[in-house]
Image (tube, grey):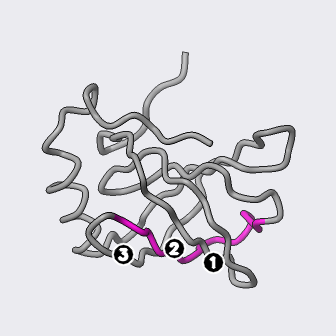
Amino acid sequence: MKTNRRNSKRHQTMALMSNIYDGRDSFLGVVEDVSTTGLRVAKIPARFDDSKGKCVSLINGLVGDIKITMQPCWVRATNRGMYKMIGFKIPDPPPEWTKFVRETLHTVPPEESFGAMTM
């Protein structure tokens, strides 16, 4: 059994997209869950370079876009290697991100959060 090492509760999301820049190219991904200190993004094309220490993301939310700097924590190949699912840590969350997570997602308990959007 794996131990949950997260410091913050994760909330599933719906209708959040992420444009992730790896230092060379920009990639679109689907944000599946978020917390104040991290997020999980799926459907990232396999050619995304996850070996970089940090990357920049623009999260496209319902109330506007939020720019964050993230670090990959774990990577899992999906769809027979066509895509990646990546868990990211947000080392220094900007105030806009913290406010977004707390006000928008923490109003619903984690077990009742929105279902993840899958493609």
Q: Is residue 43 above or below residue 79?
A: below
Please, what is the three-letter code of the amino acid marked with disc 3?
Answer: Ile
The residue at 63%/66% (across/down) is: 28
Report which residue position mark 2 lands on: 57
> Disc 3 vs disc 2: Cβ atoms closer than 8 Å?
no
Report which residue position mark 3 lands on: 66
Q: Left or right: where does residue 3 sit relative to residue 80?
A: left
Residue 17 among those drawn in magenta: no
Q: Is residue 71 above or below residue 14?
A: below
Q: Earlier in the sequence, mark 3 or mark 2?
A: 2
Q: Quadrant of residue 102?
A: bottom left
Quarter of the image that includes the N terminus: top right
> Disc 2 vs disc 1: Cβ atoms closer than 8 Å?
yes
Report which residue position mark 1 lands on: 21
The residue at 64%/71% (across/down) is: 53
Mark 3 crowdedness (10 Å alpha carbons): few <14, some 14-19, many ≥20: some
For the magenta stretch, what is the residue range? 48-61
Q: Give the x, y percent position of residue 81.
A: 85, 44
Q: Give the x, y percent position of residue 78.
A: 76, 40
Q: Earlier in the sequence, mark 2 or mark 1?
A: 1
Q: CA distance from mark 3 to mark 2?
A: 8 Å
Q: CA distance from mark 2 to mark 1?
A: 6 Å
Which is nearer the eye, 95 or 17? 17
